[in-house]
Each structure stands twice: as structure tokens, then as C-alpha cells.
Image (tube, rainbow, N blue to C red):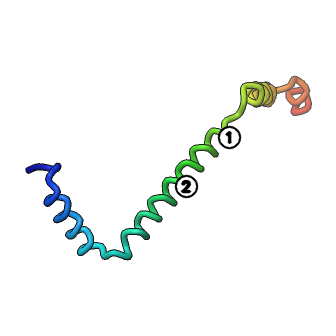
Amino acid sequence: MGFSSIWHWIIVLVVVLLLFGAGKIPRLMGDVAKGVKAFKKGMADDDDDEPTSAERKAIDDSKSADAAPSAKTKEDAS
């Protein structure tokens, strides 16, 4: 008995075919395959979106330059 019995698998197959029908199973598997492909594409896009170390340095430099107020703007305000 157990999961290795051929009769067990035949009964499971019959129950699955009765519940889902013979035409619905291939469509279901096609939808699963599309989902896996979309997931893989999304993971590849995430890898491409990460900035390189040179891009990160340029972003950090521009942020620090924008954050430091200049002396001229303080004098112009008075």
C-alpha cells in the first residue's frame, strides 16, 4: 500500500479527471508555464535594474552636492 501502489495512482488520476475534466488540465498547465516564464523574466529585469558601482558613486556625489547649501544663497537672502 502507500504511494507506490499502482491502484492508488489510478484512482487519483480518475478523481482528478472527473474534477477538472480532460480539457482543463492542459490549459491549467499552460497557465502555470506562463507564470513561470513571467517570473523568470521579472527576475532577469530586476538584475538589469540594479545600478553599477560607478552609477551608485555618481548618484551619491550628486546627492551630496545638492545637500550642501552654498554661501551665495545665504548672502542673497539678506
Type of amino acid at the residue the image marks with label 1 = Asp
Instruction: Mark 2: give few (<14), some (14-19) or many (20+) Cα within 10 Å.
Output: few
Q: Is residue 76 above or below residue 29?
A: above
- Residue at 81% over, 26% down: 65
Q: Quadrant of residue 56?
A: top right
Decide if residue 67 is in sight here: no
- Residue at 14% over, 58% down: 8
Q: Residue furthest front?
A: 6
Decide if residue 4 is on the left or right side of residue 52.
left
Which label was assigned to residue 48?
Answer: 1
- Residue at 16% over, 50% down: 3
Circle 1: element type = helix
Which label was assigned to residue 60?
Answer: none
Q: Residue 2, position in %: x, y?
A: 11, 49
Q: Is residue 73 above or below residue 26?
A: above
Decide if residue 6 is on the left or right side of residue 76.
left
Question: Mark 2 = which residue?
Answer: 38
Q: How far, Cα to Cα, is label 2 from label 1?
A: 15 Å
Q: Residue 48, position in %: x, y?
A: 68, 40
Q: Residue 53, position in %: x, y?
A: 72, 25
Image quadrant where one finds the C terminus: top right
Q: Residue 77, position in %: x, y?
A: 87, 33
Q: Residue furthest left?
A: 1
The answer to which of 52 and 33 lies nearer the viewer is 33
- Residue at 41% over, 69% down: 26
Find out whether the residues at labels 2 and 1 contact each other: C-beta distance under 8 Å.
Answer: no
Type of amino acid at the residue the image marks with label 2 = Ala
Q: Is residue 68 above or below residue 22?
A: above
Pair 2/1: label in front = 2
